[in-house]
Structures are given as structure tokens and as C-alpha cells.
Amino acid sequence: MPWWILNADEPKLADAELVSTGRLPSPQWVDTPPAFDDMLRALAGAPAIAVDTESDSLYRYFHKVCLIQISVPEADYIVDPLRLPDVAGLGAIMADPRTEKVFHAAENDILVMKRDFGSTFANIFDTMIAARILGWSRVSLAAVLEQRFGVTLDKRAQLTDWGRRPLTPEQLRYAALDTHFLLPLREVLERELRARHRWREAQEAFAALPDVEYVEKPFDPESFWHSKVVRALQPGELAVFRELYLWRDAEARVRDCPPFKVMNDEALARLSREQPRRLDDLPSSTRRDAAVSGAILHAVARGRGAAPPAPPRRSRDDTQRPDPTAVALYDRLRAWRSARAAERGVDADVVLTNQALMTIARAAPLGVEQLAALGVLGAWKLEEYGSDLLAVVAGR
């Protein structure tokens, strides 16, 4: 039996116990060019590496990748891109189709590495996608490690500030565990995928991952409409809320922290209803900073003098609500998908996403060529679901 598979009767181990028992060797910290070069030489020619990243999006407005974890059977590496002059040397490995990159929930890691380092990717295996295709009931990495390897993660480290230095021993253990078991987990998943004839389906899903693209989303001053709290505000209060919303984003940029750490939406709504005019009218926690207090009072005053904002109008492009015929077909397609997903024991979106179903409903294809031309089905899904989908479109 491989070392990574625990017996059912063997006790679960917390991450600290893994270190003390020798199950988790200390990771190699890579924060200097010589250490980085040594790692690249060790990874050269590896058939597969496990990869993960940690970012500071919970603590920064301008968030960034703070760690890159890489594991091979011989070692775990934790790369510090905040200390290294660059990590360009990893680009060749990420783009090399001869080396498989194993991630758990790869999409976000791929997106942030493209954004921060200009990385390109080839040959991806996503253990979370594989687990979902197999219908595993719990697919988070923490749940999989506990169920399959008897390892309990210290989840407190997940929400820590990865941009601060030095990192604590708890953070380093957590970071190393994010990749340490991915290669053996990949072997477990491939065997089960092949045994259940779902290997082609998984490969098709993996093949789409290198093409995901990071799209910069600039701050939208009208995005305050998405907040749930605005539903209970009166028109005049909405005008104040909008001005406070704009102030909060500007303040978050200056502080380089997420807007919710400046002030949450509930506090903005309360100020919008109370509309304070003097310093004494503000909450005591806000009065501690004179500059912030003054900025809030100015924002409230601007809102009182502004016209109530009008809700955004629905654009007249292809994203508008489809016609009733397409809606009815979409509902029938969803019913078919629910039945097929239940039959397979997977979540509905593993079969097809809502976006794919709506594309099919709008086009109402009459044959396989028209269905394939929509570009929402890969070869496996076209073969597996094509005739069923066309039957639903035809009303059969």
C-alpha cells in the first residue's frame, strides 16, 4: 500500500502532528535567486508537479500573489514572489506540455498567475473538477484531505494575511499541505475516473483551463445597486449611500485595503438613513479619525444635495431577457439536466452550465452541426448529450 493511503483504523492527524511524526517534511523556503535556481533545477524534467497560490485579497485593495507552493514527491517548495526579483523561471514549466500541473480548483490560481506574472499554461489536472465529475459529496481540499488521507487542516491559517512577513510556522504548514498530497490524490482520482469511464470527460474539462483569461474589472460607481441593503433605502437615502460608497472606495485605495475593512454596507446604510450633519452625530468609532469623520460628513452633505440615483436600465443587447419561446426551452433543458445529473450522481453544472443551456435555448439548433457550432460543448459532451439535447429542442 502506498505511504499516502491511511488504513481506515488509523487516527486522523492534525497538520502539526504530521510534522512531528515525519509525515510532512519541512518545506523548502525559496526567497533568494540561488534558492530559486536550485528549485528550478530540481523540477526540470518532472513529469508532474503540484501547484497552489496564496493571495492577500482579504487584506489589500490591490491584491497580489504572495506565495506559490510547488510539490514533487521528493520535496515541498514555498516560493516567495514578494522577496524574489522575479519568478519568470517558472513560466517555462507552467507552459511546458510535458509537465503536468496538478491544482485543486485551478481556475483562480491560473487567473492570478496570468495577471501577476504573465504565465501561460498547458497540461492541467484539477483534482476538484475530477472529484466533482466523480460525484464526491465534499470536494473542498480540507474535506478531501480528511476523508482520503486522514489529515485535518488548521483552517484558521486560510484567512491569515499572506502578505505579511515573516510567516508563522502554522502558515507554512498550511501552505505546504495545500500541495503536499495533490500528486497522490491525482493518482487516486485518475484510477477512479478510468474505472467509472469518466476519464475522457475529465480530460475535456481540464483542457479548457489553460484558456481562462483574467479580465480586469475597474471600479463601477453604479455597482452599489448590487448591495442588498439598498433595497430598504428611500430615494433621498440612496443618494447619500451612493456618495458614501464612492468615498469608501477612494479611501480603500488610499489605505490599500478591501472596501469592507473601511466600512461595511450596513454601516453605510445606517449613515444614509441618519444623515449626520455634525461630528457629534457620528458613531464614536468613526470620530477617532478627524480626516475620516470630515470626509464622511462631506459625502453625506453631497448626497443630501444630489438627485436620487436612477436604477440602471437594462441594456438592449444580446444579454437582455430572451423571448418566451427561448425561456420555455431553457426550462425544459434544465429539467433534462436535473434528471441526467441525478442519474449520474453529480451536481447539475457538471453536466452543463446555465450559460451553456441558455445558449442552446436561444439558438434552438436543429442538428448536430448547428449544436456543435455553438461552441458550448466539447467533443465528449457533444457525443454524450448531443442527441438528448436535440430531442429536447425538438420537443420530444
Image (cartoon, rainbow, N blue to C red):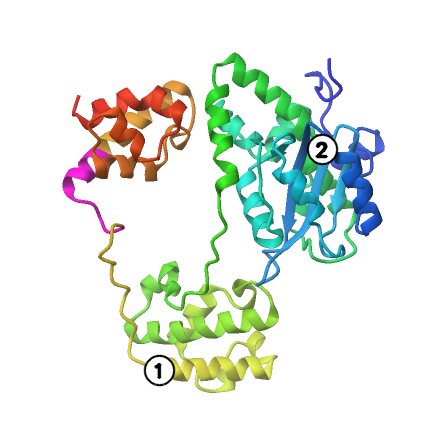
Q: Residue at x 68, y 35 (%)?
A: 179
Question: What crowding class fits label 2: few (fewer than 14 Cα within 10 Å), some (14-19), or many (20 or more)?
Answer: many
Place of residue 45 in the rendered image (x, y in percent of width and height, measured from the top left): 73, 30
In the figure, is residue 177 to the left or right of 200?
right
Q: Is residue 338 visible?
A: yes
Q: What's drawn in magenta, residue-wise?
A: 319-330
Would you name the residue on which mark 1 appears?
304
For the C terminus, the image quarter is top left
Determine whether the residue tagged by mark 2 lies in a helix, strand or loop.
helix
In the depicted structure, whether residue 287 falls above or below residue 91: below
Q: Is residue 137 visible?
A: no
Place of residue 131 in the rendered image (x, y in percent of width and height, measured from the top left): 53, 26
Residue 180 tag number: 2
Q: Amino acid at mark 2?
A: His
Q: Is residue 90 magenta?
A: no
In the depicted structure, whether residue 119 falls above or below residue 63: above
- Label total for image: 2
Q: Residue at x 67, y 27 (%)?
A: 183
Q: Amino acid at mark 1?
A: Arg
Sequence-wise, which precedes: disc 2 or disc 1?
Answer: 2
In the figure, is residue 338 to the left or right of 277?
left
In the depicted structure, whether residue 362 falls above or below residue 218: above
Image quadrant where residue 375 sits: top left
For the N terminus, the image quarter is top right
**For the residues carrying marks 2 and 1, which lies nearer the camera in this image?**
2
Place of residue 359 in the rendered image (x, y in percent of width and height, measured from the top left): 28, 38
